[in-house]
Image (cartoon, helix red, strand yellow):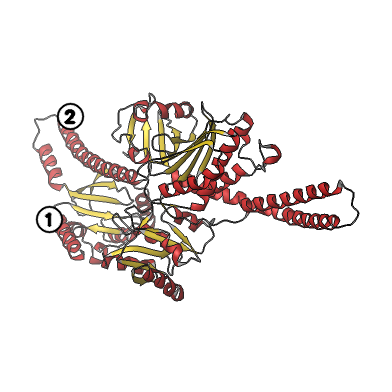
Amino acid sequence: MERSEDHTKSMTTSGLNLIAQALSIYDSNLRLVLSNAPFQTMFQLPDALVTPGAAFSETVEHLIHSGEYGHVENPQTFLEERLRQARAFQPHYMERTRSNGRTISVEGSPLPDGGWVTVYTDISATKAQESLLRAHAGALSEQLLAHTEQLSRSNRKLAAMITTLEETKRQLTASEARARLTTEMVPAHIAHVDAQGYYTYSNRRLSTIIPGRPSDILGRHLRDVLGDAIHSRISSSLASAFSGTATLQEFTEAASAHRIRTAFTPDLQGGIYILTMDITEETQTRTTLQQTRRRALAAQMISGLAHDFSNLLTIILGLQSRLGRLPDLPRDAAPLIEGTLSAARRGGTLLQSIAQMTGPRTLRPVVTDIEVLMRDLVTLAEPALPHAMKLTLNVGGGIGPVLLDRGIVQDSLLNLVLNARDAMGTAGEITLRVRRVHDTWIEWQVSDTGPGFSPDALSKGLDPFFTTKGAEGSGLGLPMVYDMIKISGGDLRLSNTATGAHVTLRLPYRAAVPATTGLTLLVEDRDDLRAVVRDMLMDLGQSVIEAASADEATALLADLPDIGLILSDIQLEGEATGIDLVRRLGKGAPPVVLMTSLPPDAPLFLEAQKRAPVLCKPFTRDDLASLITRREAVVL
């Protein structure tokens, strides 16, 4: 590569030396970048001043002392003036007669990255022809001669201007090409529409942000490109932007279930600039983090109260037990004592429920077959349903093995089924549907044929301690489900249909990691941990090759194409992390599982969850095995 570059440079220099004009290029620091042989010959410059890096000030100083500019009254002032002009360089064309009597034209043009290029042309012959014409053309009028000379000078100046304009056009074309390439690499759709809503610019990324939309959209109207549904949702933001107010809007695109953020910026010349991004993963992570923070705050507030309340309940239980053992109690005292004990025990159960909601919880995703999970759920739920109540299961196809916290899903769905049972009484039908929404969500729908949610239940049903069951309910069922779904990055919605209540539960779709029977790359910088994990992998039938850093792992991946699985810690020796390793992998790379001891709300942990399955330390062989399936699947 270096030899090829040297050859190209040599050929370029040789070509510049063959042209008649002298040429020099100086950078923004007034240092020589390039010159040709005629430049040195024309001004009789020493080698030091035509060597790249030579100072412009030294060259001017040399020309002053050599008499290039004729007699200079104050050389220092003259030098400072030339340097000032160079720093504020402007395109120009001029002709001057040198001290040796020859005439040159000087044509200068600035460069886009700073500095300038100057071309010097000896026009002495042309000027001599003009003088000769004047001397031998007595028959010609003085006016015609002057006009001819002026026309010749104008032609030379016009030619210089044309050259400058062509160079400027070339630079603008190259700059536009670089700008377009840059915008097309941005993971967002950048566009401009005119005042009538027609696209005048697009970086052709719309289809990657909103699947199913076209990318070739120049000249088309917003409504035609986005569709009536999306256009109607953003119409108010468009109206504000057209009136001169920048707006930002988020919405969920129904067909793909992607969360979209769009910024509208008014164009002072007319129209709007539009920036559209897919923030689905960001929204899922943000939801998880927000719920984790709420849980931490609730735990901080409740822990002290719960501690004191637990002590009070303990005292009440103890005193009531002693009271029940006293002799000669009135006959009606026993029911009162038993009622007090029952209330105290119920208070203890309530405290445990609160602790489950606010206490720390680590997600434990495992490879889950949705059909098996749902059949197991029916097995658990049916014995708790009245004989006249029917539970119908509808499992959509194409889901495949996925990574889920099986306990969270099963507990949540069972809670929803039992809530539906309580609402219907002794008879009715509960329908449980599950489907995959593109590559974004797994969606469960629980509907019943009961009376549906009341207006209060629709607005407050997810609030802690809200219940419509009176003394029978704790008001923590749906809030606990909502909490578990939120910390998993999902969503829960309550609604009514024509036949009864309807609950929609969504969790991020995470396809399971396919197992391999070949070679596993283990990336861990601690020797003792690496030895333990290596034994686990070998016990699972894997051959293991080891690395201590992301750079070492990258080198091994380049040399060993047979690697079928990567198990990497997030925090590694060196600057690169396990997340950086995942970023380096291209298409067709082996699946990755990341492991860490970081808390679930740590920024690196949240970032890792968007890239690959995360295995929390400490873990066992069974925990590792639970993340791997031998069915065909894709990696997160």
Q: Which mark is residue 397?
A: none
- Which residue is at 60% across, 34% downward? 425
Task: Work out whether 2 lies above or below 248.
Answer: below
Q: On the rendered image, what quadrant is the N terminus found in?
A: bottom left
**Quick check: can you spot residue 70?**
no
How many marks can you see? Answer: 2
Q: Secondary structure at mark 1?
A: helix
Hey, what amino acid is under mark 2? Gln
Horizontally, residue 9 falls left or right of residue 424, namely: left
- In which quadrant of the rendered view does residue 628 lie? bottom left
Q: Residue 525 occupies which quadrant of the picture?
A: bottom left
At 50% from the left and 65% from the top, the residue drawn is: 617
| 1 vs 2, front mark | 1
Residue on which disc 1 sits: 18
311 sits to left or right of 327: left
Seen from the viewer's position, the closer of residues 446 and 627 is 446
What residue do we see at 33% from left, 34% from top?
A: 213
Q: CA distance from mark 1 to mark 2?
A: 40 Å
The answer to whether residue 447 is above or below residue 354 is above
Q: Position of residue 451 (x, y in %)?
A: 58, 29
Residue 256 at x, y percent in the picture: 39, 38
Asked if one can make out residue 615 in the rendered structure from this viewpoint, the answer is yes
The first of marks 1 and 2 along the sequence is: 1
Disc 1 marks which amino acid? Leu
Horizontally, residue 432 falls left or right of residue 178, namely right
Depth order, front residue of 591/166: 591
Residue farthest to the top? 196
Give whichever of 35, 374 is nearer the camera.
Answer: 374
Q: Helix, strand or loop at disc 2?
A: helix
In the depicted view, which residue is nearer to us: 229 or 317? 317
Q: For mark 2, what is the residue?
A: 143
Is 152 left or right of 70, judged from the image as shown? left
